[in-house]
Each structure stands twice: as C-alpha cells, then as structure tokens.
Image (cartoon, helix red, strand yellow):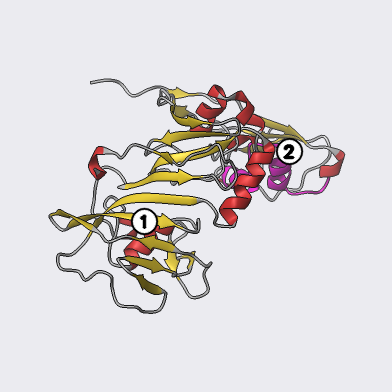
Amino acid sequence: MTAAPAPRSRAPLVVHASADDEGKRADVVLGLRAPQLSRRVARALALAGHLHIDGRPAPPSQRVRAGARLELRLPATPELPPPPLVILAVTPRLVFVDKPAGLHTHRLRPGDPLALADLVAAAFPECAAASPDPREAGALHRLDHATSGVLAFARDLATHAAGRAAFAARTVVKHYLALVTCPEGQPWPPPAARWIVPDGDRLEVHAPLATGDRRQRVSVHSDGAPSLTRIARPEPRGEGLARVTLELCSGRRHQARVHLAWLGLPIVGDPLYGGAPAHRLHLHAHSLDLRAIDPDAAPVLAETPPELR
C-alpha cells in the first residue's frame, strides 16, 4: 500500500497594516492588502483560529492599528503531483485548455493545492498578469471543481476584459454533454409551461436561478437571476440513462445541473441535485466558441470522456 503524501507546511501570510488601515476590521485589511486572498476567505480562516495579530490569536472583526502585524497561519495540506496541462488551442490572445474533473479553476485560498490557473501561468507567464486578480491567471470563466472540459484564459488584460464582457452579453457559445437519469418513455419535448419553451426537437429552459436552501445549493425561483439553457433531445443509453447535449446561453452557478434536475433529468454523479451515485460528476464542457472577441479562435472542442461517449 502506498503511503499518503506527507502534509506540506505552508508559509504564513503576513500583512503589515498601514496608516490607511487604522481602525479597520482585520478581515477587511487582509482582503485589501493580500491580492491572492478575498475578505470572505480571510474571515473564514480567522474564524477557524488561523489569524494572529502581533502574535496573539484574533477574530476577523478585531480592529487593527497602524503598524500591526497580521499573520494567517495556514493549515498544512498534502503535497500532490500536479496533473498534466492539456493545451487544446492557442491564439495570440487566448489559451484554451482541457480541465480535468476534480481540479479547481483557480485557488480559493493562499496555499491551496495547485489549480488549473497555476499550470496555465507556468506554461504561459503572460497569463499571470492578464487579470486583475492574479489567482485567476486570465481565466475568462470557471467550471465547477467536478466538471471537466474546455476553459479559456486571456493572455492580456484587454482580452480578459473583452472576454468577460462577451460572457456577460451572451455572445459566447458554450456546449456541454451530460449523462442523466431519464425514465423510459419520458415524453420529449415536454409540453410548454412556465419557463419551458419547446423549439422543435429542442427545449428552451428559462427558469431563473437563486441561492437555495443550503449555502452550496442553487434552485429555481421566480426572484432568481434570468437564465437560459437550450437542451437537445436526450439520447437513450440504456438502464434508464441518457446523454444530453445542452447549450448554456447564460453562465449562472450550477446552471446545467439545476435546470436538468428541475426537468427530472438529474446528472449522474450529482447527489446535491438528486443524481445517481457515481465516481464523478458526468458533466463535460464539450465546446467553446470565442470568435465574438477573437476571430482567430475557431470553436475549440475538448475530447469527450469515455463515460460520456
């Protein structure tokens, strides 16, 4: 049996409060002075007992004085070898890579294990300065930790701004593949109803999305953000399963997962939304078209995982 990797000690994150920080909350100062750290993450780490001010444990709400030494003593994590970076396409302005399931798009906390953005910045150093937040390394969008597929990174700030604007304006074309539970004989398309618009053999789902009953959940709610997913006819795969091709016309958190579950087609490997157990979330970002911002960028495809072929 192979032994588990030994935890890797992390250097503490140290910030010295300036005169402008006098009287501010500690988590606010950390969020302002540590570019790789958000206030939300700083507060969570402080609440877990990792914050010390001038050598003494402190809560995130403690007011600091000018010259104070704020130190976040980060917990150790196992040292794991990084996965290989799979480059799908490169243009003078963009880098397209294939994200494996189980890897974050970028680090959420300083000292976290390597994320995809770190691998991209190592291979394309200019990406490290291509977004206001250096943790993102120019990432134009994100995929859930458990989702695989094509991701785009900008190589300069102008492209990053244009890319974010294109995603917000819905001029980017994104297609996904999912393996779902599909009862035998389920009619398609379902009849028109609130937020459901049949379109030939496709279906448009306009159900708005909002934060649900649990912090990590999203749900369909009339007061939610406008969302649109186009879904093709499910392709039966036997044993009550089907493969679905869908286009995300908006980019809401968990959009594909929630819209499919709301239709009674939960994704395999997605227990959060009622999906059957599996070793991974069976959701894959299959193609991405960014010609709206870069005419040199032909639509890019990420190879379909074996379980979705």
Q: Quadrant of residue 280?
A: top left
Task: Tell me whether circle 2 and circle 1 mark residues in contact (CB < 8 Å).
Answer: no
How far is disc 2 from disc 1 in space, using C-alphas? 41 Å
Question: How far from the left and from the top, in percent, is residue 194?
Answer: 40, 79
Q: Farthest residue to the right: give it.
A: 19
Q: Give the residue at x 68% y 46%.
A: 27
Looking at the rendering, in which quadrant would you find the N terminus? top left
Question: How far from the left and from the top, in percent, is residue 87?
Answer: 45, 28
| Marked residue nearer the N-terminal end (2 or 1) | 2
Going by the numbered disc 2, the residue's amino acid type is Arg
Q: Quadrant of residue 124?
A: top right
Q: Nearer the viewer, residue 76 or 120?
A: 120
Find the magenta span and give its range: 22-46
From what the image shows, is residue 157 above or below residue 274? above
From what the image shows, is residue 62 above or below residue 15? below
Please state if 154 lies on the left or on the right of 272 as rendered: right
Q: Nearer the viewer, residue 36 or 95?
A: 95
Q: Residues within 10 Å of mark 2 (few under 14, many from 20)?
A: some
Please state if 107 lies on the left or on the right of 83 as rendered: right
Per the image, is 92 magenta?
A: no
Question: How far from the left and from the top, in percent, is residue 13?
Answer: 64, 31
The residue singled out by tag 1 in the image is: 246
The residue singled out by tag 2 in the image is: 33
From what the image shows, is residue 184 above or below residue 92? below
Looking at the rendering, in which quadrant would you find the C terminus? top left
Q: Is residue 1 visible?
A: yes
